[in-house]
Amino acid sequence: MTRAAVCGFDADPPDAVWRLIFQRVNMYRIREVDAHDDEVEDTLTDLHRLTFFDEAPMPEFEQGHWWCAFHETSPVAFAGVVQSTRAHNAGYFCRVGVLKKHRGHALQLRLMRALEVRARRNGWSSVVSDSTDNLASSNNFIRAGYWLYQPPYPWAYPNTLYWRKSVI
C-alpha cells in the first residue's frame, strides 16, 4: 500500500505536502514527567490554572503518573493517571487540560494513549474516567475507544458520564 493510500489520498502528493503533514504531527511532543520535581509540579499547576481556572480542584500531582505535551519547548497540555479507588485493577484518568490556543491538534487523544501504555506497564487491566458537560472530551473518549459504563457506586454528579477502556 502506498503512503498516499495509507493517508487517504487518491494520488501521491508532492514532497512539500508530506513535509507539512509530518511537520504538523511532529509539532508536539508528549513526555512523561516527574511531578515530584518542584519545577515540573509548578508547570503542572500553571497548566491546570490556565485550563481549568477555578472550575476544578487542583490534583495532587505527587500521586500517580503525569505527562506534558510540548510545543517546541513550551508545555501546552497535561494529563494524569492514578490507581483507581473505585474500579478493580484499573487506572483512573484523573485530569487532562489543553491550552485553548493548542486545541484541535489531538493532544488529549495522544495523552490518553500515553497513559494507557503506562496503565499496561503497571499491570492494570483497564482505565476508567468520567466527564461532565464536556462534549469535546466525551468525543475524545469515544475516538480513543472508551465505552460508557455504569459503575456500581457512581462517584460524581448525576449528569456525569463514566468511561472505561480495557488495556490488556
Image (cartoon, rainbow, N blue to C red):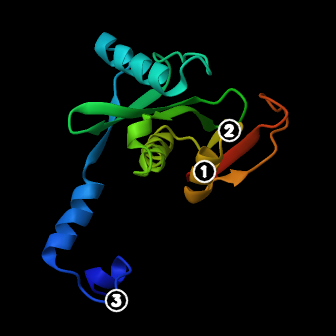
Q: Is residue 113 above or below residue 40?
A: below
Q: Which of the numbered marks, if any, corresponds to residue 167?
A: none
- Is residue 13 rendered to the left or right of residue 98? left
Q: Is residue 32 left or right of residue 74?
A: right
- Alpha carbon of mark 2 to alpha carbon of mark 3: how far? 38 Å
Quadrant housing residue 154: top right
Q: Amino acid at mark 3?
A: Asp
Do the numbered discs 1 and 3 sit on residues whose CB atoms are within 8 Å? no
- Percent x, y of residue 51: 49, 28
Q: Quadrant of residue 15?
A: bottom left
Element type at mark 2: strand
Amino acid at pointer 2: Ser
Label 1 sits on residue: 141
Tell me residue 126's x, y (percent): 61, 45
Q: Amino acid at mark 1?
A: Phe
Residue lying at 52% horizontally and 15% vertically, measured from the top left: 60
**Position of the N terminus by quadrant:** bottom left
Residue occupying image coordinates x 50% and y 41%: 119
Task: Pick whichever, 61 or 85, lies toward us.
Answer: 61
Image marks 1 and 2: residues in contact by CB distance under 8 Å: yes
- SS category of the residue bearing label 1: helix
Residue 10 shows which numbered tag?
3
* Sequence-first tag of 1 and 3: 3
Q: Disc 1 or 2, which lies upstream in sequence?
A: 2
Question: Secondary structure under badge 3?
Answer: loop
Q: Does residue 51 show up? A: yes
In x, y percent, where is residue 140? 56, 51
Q: How far apart are labels 1 and 3 at the CA level?
A: 30 Å
- Residue on which the image places disc 2: 131
In the picture shown, does residue 138 fall above or below 16?
above
